[in-house]
Each structure stands twice: as C-alpha cells, then as structure tokens.
Amino acid sequence: MTVSEIVADYIREHRANARDEMRFYEIQRSPAKAIEKAALCVLPSGKRHPHQHRISGAVLELAEVRLQEIQGQLKQAKNFDALHRIIAERIGSIPGIGTLTVYDIAHRISAFFRIYPELVYLHAGARKGAAFWGIKGDAFDPGILPKPFFRLQPYEIEDCLCLYKKDFGIERAERSIQACAGKNPKKTRCHF
C-alpha cells in the first residue's frame, strides 16, 4: 500500500471508532468522572481498553486516585503538552504504567477538556511506524510527514503509525527495491 492508500484505509476503517471513543470521554458529566473513566481505561462498551488489558486493576486505581488529587491542575492545563506532562509526572512512576498508558490517559482526559494534541506523541508501536520516516524522540510536528498524512489529526497520525507500522516498512522496502532495480536491472543484490 502507498502512504495515500494507508491514510485512506485508516480513515475508512478506524477514524469513526477513534472519534466515538474520544466522544465518550468528552461527554462525561464532570472532570472527576472523566478522570475516573480515563484512568481506569474504560471504553464506551464498559470494557477495559486493550492497550491496558495487562495492567492490574489496582495499578489503574492508584493512577486514578493520584489524578483525582490534582484535578485542579489538570483543569488549568493550557494545552495537551502541559496536560500530558502533568499526568506523566503524577503517574509515570507507578510500576506498570508506561509511556503508552500515560499518553492514552492524557488523551482521554484531554478530550473532556477539549484540548487535543498538536504534536504526534511516540511510544510503543507508533515509535516503530515513525522510524520508517527517520523520526525519533518522544513527539514531533506532523508537518514533517508526507502530504497524505495532512488529512489526519495528530492523534490520528499516532494511531495510524501504530496500526500500519508493518505496511510502512513494506512500502519502504518496495521503493528501495524499485530504486535499486532502476539503477541496474541485472543487479540481484541490493542493500537498503
């Protein structure tokens, strides 16, 4: 698949579900309820999000308690980066809570406060997808990606990089093979 095809597939197959999930956190009745649902990783179905299925309930409950204690700070966050930083400082040291869970909880809480990521945050699978574009670090400006990605919001890009990480590798390998073949059609060995 080309990048355009991957983005189109993401929009067709995943965008509606991702937006429905965020809408669930947006419509919670109070910041306390939003923090509860987000920290306990509850989906609209009432089940736990698969990203956090291996984390014990006690660990997520501790994360919720710690976040409820700083509800005022969370309300005052001016942007997603500030909110993410506050949450990372508060729960990132809990054994069993990794960067993916910190990001997911921050993203869910940010939906309630209607502040969304302006950068693409990297962790786990998204980091692997970004590596195909030579991107490293914890977050990056989505404007550095190829034009087809401009159809996606930063949080959708993060999701797309994770979901399609293998497809980006296949496309890159195919482009490299084509480039090698174009230089020397008889060449049987190509290093990329």
Image (spheres, grey):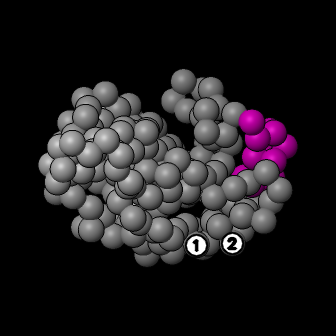
Q: CA distance from mark 2 to mark 1?
A: 6 Å
Mark 1 neighbour density, 10 Å: few (under 14) some (14–19) many (20 or more): some
Q: Amino acid at mark 1?
A: Arg
Q: Quadrant of the C terminus?
A: bottom left
Is residue 2 a member of the stretch shown in magenta?
no
Residue 145 in percent (x, y) is at: 26, 61
Any part of residue 109 in sight: no
State the residue at coordinates (35%, 60%): 133
Marker disc for residue 89: 2
State the residue at coordinates (25%, 34%): 1
Q: Total marks drawn?
A: 2
Residue 151 in percent (x, y) is at: 19, 50
The answer to which quarter of the image holds residue 42 is top right
- The residues colored magenta run 54-65
State the residue at coordinates (35%, 39%): 170
Name the residue tied to disc 1.
85
Secondary structure, magenta segment, majority class: helix
